[in-house]
Image (spheres, rainbow, N blue to C red):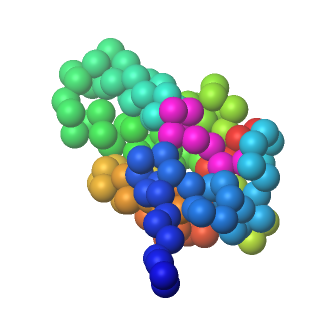
Amino acid sequence: MGGVSAVPSPATGGTPASGWPGRRLGLPPEGTGSIARLGRRLAALLVDWAAANLISYAFLGGDPWVTLALFTAIQLVFVALTGSSPGHRVLGMRVARLDGARTGLLDATVRGALIALVIPPVVVDVDQRGLHDRARGTVLVRR
C-alpha cells in the first residue's frame, strides 16, 4: 500500500517524523542551543507581560493599549540590546539568528511588532518557530 505518513502537528507538541524540533536547522535535540519548548516560552511571555502590566498600572493608569505598547517596547529594547527579553533571560533562553549574526534592532522590531499582533507566534512550523521568527530568520533557543 502506498501510504502517506502522518506528521504530528507542532501546534499540539508534535515533532517532525524525522526527529526533533530544530533538527532541520542543525540544532541539538535538547540542552543548550536546542529549540525552546512551549512551556518555557509561555512562562517567559507571562514574565514580560507581568512586567509591562506592573509598569503600566504603577505609572501610566493601566490602559491596555499602553500595556501592549510597553510589552512591545520591552521586547524591542531587550532583544535588540541583549538578544533576550527579561522573561527569556529568567527562563534561560535567547533569540538566535540562523545565520549566526547577532540579533539587532530590525530583528527585534519585526519580532516585537508581530508578537504584539498575537497570531504570528501562534502559527508555528515543525521546528516550533512562529511566523515572527521565520520572518527574520531567528529562533528561540535554550541558553
In this view, the residue farthest toward the front is: 1
Residue 17 located left or right of residue 57: right
In this view, the residue farthest toward the top is: 58
Q: Nearer the viewer, residue 70 or 16?
A: 16
Residue 78 located left or right of residue 100: left
Residue 120 located left or right of residue 130: left
Residue drawn at x 28%, y 19% as measured from the top left: 57
Q: Nearer the viewer, residue 66 or 97?
A: 97
Residue 129 screen position, x and y as percent: 53, 58
Residue 62 screen position, x and y as percent: 23, 24
Number of marks in picture: 0
Residue drawn at x 30%, y 40% as measured from the top left: 68
Queried whether the magenta region covers residue 37, the answer comes back as yes
Queried whether the magenta region covers residue 143, the answer comes back as no
Q: Nearer the viewer, residue 69 or 124?
A: 124
In this view, the residue farthest toward the bottom is: 2
Identify the magenta region.
34-41
Residue drawn at x 71%, y 67% as measured from the top left: 25
| The C terminus - image quarter | top right
Q: Is 129 above or below relative to 46?
A: below
Residue drawn at x 31%, y 50% as measured from the top left: 118
Residue 94 visible = no
Q: Is 4 above or below relative to 22?
A: below
Residue 108 screen position, x and y as percent: 54, 56
Q: Is 119 above or below relative to 40?
A: below
Residue 62 located left or right of residue 71: left
Residue 36 visible = yes
Residue 122 screen position, x and y as percent: 37, 52
